Image (cartoon, rainbow, N blue to C red):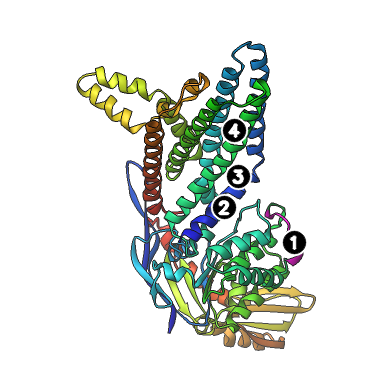
């Protein structure tokens, strides 16, 4: 069963005063995310990721389309009790302490007295903020605020969690901790929907991803399935003092270190390259197919619209 | 439902209490009351009149400043700082948020006015050495001042639901000032003819009748306040505020949070 179904959600803004123009922040989007999945919502800045999340949270009204979360219409107030949301670069009431803030959010989520106090303490421990629980949030670093943000999103034990750029602004340790936490949430059976433009995180975490660019869905599926369609590359290493012009002519990117040449070239040029090496009687050291990464797929999808962009397509 | 409104109201109250600016304003108002004692002492025979007049005017003026100053940020600050995102992604309806904010600031103002009212009574006790029966009317005047706060809070909330903090402050303060001359506006509407008359009549009903809520002068002269006026003013203030808050809810329900 799908935990989230996005059924043609669309957002159009009108810009300009005298000469009004329509700007599509999001073209009709169709997505289905299964229960217990970690789903990555990828795209460059301005792709429409945050707009989609805001529409799902009821913060922005869609121009058309609908969505269902846990089989309920996304506007149904009952949905809100079962979802958690971490906005991008969260900011909280800075006059409150971390404990007071979580207690307040717990009250708004309908968690009662003792259970609330227990959950708040438990979560402060889980995100490593127990020692700073009595410090006002105005004294918190960006990373600490992100942790508070994650804590408030999962405080009421939601079934579906939406994170908007959860790794943004975190140092490597912080990113690792957030990744671990998201994996824990998956083990607890929760559905995690998160937007990011950090592809390594998505590749390491996600069961499936969707790629959005300029408000349009460019692809969706498991990382392995998406990258299968990417044209592969091979790395060839041989002994020589310089890279010959003939090798470069078949599209190889060459790097010379001492008496070793390392060349990365398209998979389909592998045989041509080997023929050239044989002809020039150069000694082959290694030939390794390079792993097709999500980044390659992403760049391929995003670059596909660049000619359109340079052609001056009106938004 | 009522629980969530209460929690939002309590948090709004807590925010105001932890805001240092609020303490500065209260301290300044108490200083004004202290000043009234000094002026009262050099005003032979009219000490009480001076203390009541200056004390209640200070409470009214500073309360209005607090209502506008805090009120303009009630919604816009939450949108600007995006604290609203984590509130509205919970089972909190937008009208509950607006109602909670309104009650929170109203509560803050009631507590402030009460504290400053204690200051006025302390000043009265100091200059007269005893309280008299007619001092009870000071409480009625204080109650009317609180009704003014409720109206101004609701108006500020209404404006802040769709405009910038600065414009909200200008609109709310302008309406408050026009409202203090609402009797004159009604007088003008009665003698004006044609379109001007219609416009003046419309405007006189649209602006809050703050003049009717100001009985400081008569109370200072030991004149009683009619029970009917208390009832009328209470009903008027509650109805006017409810309409302004409903307006804020209607605007806010349709607003996209960018």
Mark 1 lies on a secondary structure that is: helix
**What residue lies at 63% left-to-right and 78% top-to-bottom?**
A264
Q: Residues within 10 Å of mark 2 (few under 14, many from 20)?
A: many
**What residue lies at 63% left-to-right and 68% top-to-bottom?**
A151
In the rendered structure, the answer to whether residue B104 lies left or right of residue A216 reads right
Tell me the mark number nearer the camera, choosing from 1 and 4: 4
Is disc 2 in the same subunit as disc 4? yes
The range drawn in magenta is: A130-137
Q: Residues within 10 Å of mark 1 (few under 14, many from 20)?
A: some
Tell me the mark number nearer the camera, choosing from 2 and 4: 4
In the depicted structure, whether residue B13 falls above or below residue B39: below
Is residue A46 at least partly visible in the picture? no
In the depicted structure, whether residue B204 falls above or below residue B250: above
Tell me the mark number nearer the camera, choosing from 3 and 4: 4
Spatial separation of the CA atoms under disc 3 and disc 2: 10 Å
Spatial separation of the CA atoms under disc 1 and disc 3: 23 Å
Residue where numbered disc 2 is placed: B10
Is residue A107 at least partly visible in the picture? yes
Say which label, 2 or 4, has the lower sequence index.
2
In the depicted structure, whether residue A85 falls above or below residue B164: below
Nearest the eye: B156 or B37: B37
Spatial separation of the CA atoms under disc 2 and disc 1: 23 Å
Mark 4 lies on a secondary structure that is: helix
Instruction: Determine whether label 2 and label 4 are within 8 Å by CB.
Output: no
Is disc 1 in the same subunit as disc 3? no
**Magenta stretch: residue A134 in it?**
yes
Q: Residues within 10 Å of mark 4 (few under 14, many from 20)?
A: many
Is disc 1 in the same subunit as disc 4? no
């Amino acid at each position: 069963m799908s935990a989230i179904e996005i059924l043609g959600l669309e957002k159009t803004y009108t810009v300009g005063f005298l000469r009004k123009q329509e700007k599509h922040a999001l073209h009709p989007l169709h997505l289905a995310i299964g229960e217990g999945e970690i789903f990555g919502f990828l795209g460059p800045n301005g792709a429409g990721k945050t707009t989609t999340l805001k529409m799902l949270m009821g913060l922005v009204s869609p121009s058309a389309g609908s969505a269902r979360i846990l089989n309920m219409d996304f506007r149904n107030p009952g949905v809100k009790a079962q979802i958690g949301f971490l906005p991008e670069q969260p900011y909280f009431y800075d006059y409150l302490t971390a404990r007071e803030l979580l207690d307040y959010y717990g009250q708004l989520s309908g968690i009662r007295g003792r259970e609330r106090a227990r959950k708040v303490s438990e979560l402060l421990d889980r995100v490593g903020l127990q020692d700073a629980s009595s410090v006002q949030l105005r004294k918190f670093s960006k990373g600490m605020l992100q942790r508070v943000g994650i804590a408030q999103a999962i405080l009421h034990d939601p079934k579906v969690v939406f994170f908007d750029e959860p790794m943004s602004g975190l140092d490597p340790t912080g990113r690792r901790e957030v990744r671990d936490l998201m994996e824990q949430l998956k083990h607890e059976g929760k559905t995690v929907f998160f937007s990011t433009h950090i592809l390594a995180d998505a590749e390491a975490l996600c069961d499936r991803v969707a790629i959005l660019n300029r408000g349009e869905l460019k692809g969706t599926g498991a990382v392995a399935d998406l990258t299968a369609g990417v044209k592969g590359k091979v790395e060839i290493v041989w002994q020589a003092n310089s890279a010959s012009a003939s090798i470069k002519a078949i599209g190889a990117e060459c790097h010379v270190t001492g008496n070793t040449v390392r060349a990365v070239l398209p998979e389909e040029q592998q045989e041509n390259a080997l023929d050239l090496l044989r002809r020039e009687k150069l000694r082959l050291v290694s030939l390794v197919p390079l792993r097709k990464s999500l980044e390659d797929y992403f760049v391929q999808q995003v670059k596909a619209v660049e000619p359109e962009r340079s052609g001056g397509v009106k938004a | 439902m009522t629980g969530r409104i209460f929690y939002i109201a309590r948090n709004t109250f807590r925010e105001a209490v932890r805001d240092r600016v609020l303490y500065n304003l209260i301290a300044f108002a108490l200083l004004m009351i202290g000043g009234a004692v000094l002026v009262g002492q050099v005003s032979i025979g009219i000490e009480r009149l001076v203390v009541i007049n200056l004390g209640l005017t200070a409470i009214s003026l500073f309360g209005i400043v607090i209502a506008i100053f805090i009120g303009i940020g009630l919604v816009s600050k939450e949108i600007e700082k995006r604290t609203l995102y984590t509130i509205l992604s919970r089972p909190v309806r937008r009208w509950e948020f607006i109602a909670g904010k309104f009650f929170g600031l109203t509560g803050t103002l009631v507590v402030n006015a009460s504290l400053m009212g204690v200051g006025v009574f302390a000043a009265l006790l100091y200059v007269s050495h005893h309280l008299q029966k007619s001092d009870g009317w000071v409480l009625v005047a204080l109650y009317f001042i609180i009704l003014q706060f409720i109206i101004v809070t609701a108006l500020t909330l209404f404006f802040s639901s769709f405009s910038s903090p600065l414009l909200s402050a200008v609109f709310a303060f302008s309406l408050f000032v026009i409202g203090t001359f609402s009797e004159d506006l009604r007088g003008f509407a009665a003698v004006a003819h044609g379109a001007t008359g219609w416009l003046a009549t419309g405007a006189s009903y649209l602006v809050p009748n703050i003049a009717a809520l100001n009985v400081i002068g008569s109370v200072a002269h030991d004149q009683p306040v009619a029970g009917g006026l208390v009832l009328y003013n209470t009903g008027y203030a509650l109805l006017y505020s409810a309409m302004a808050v409903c307006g804020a809810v209607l605007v806010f329900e349709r607003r996209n949070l960018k």
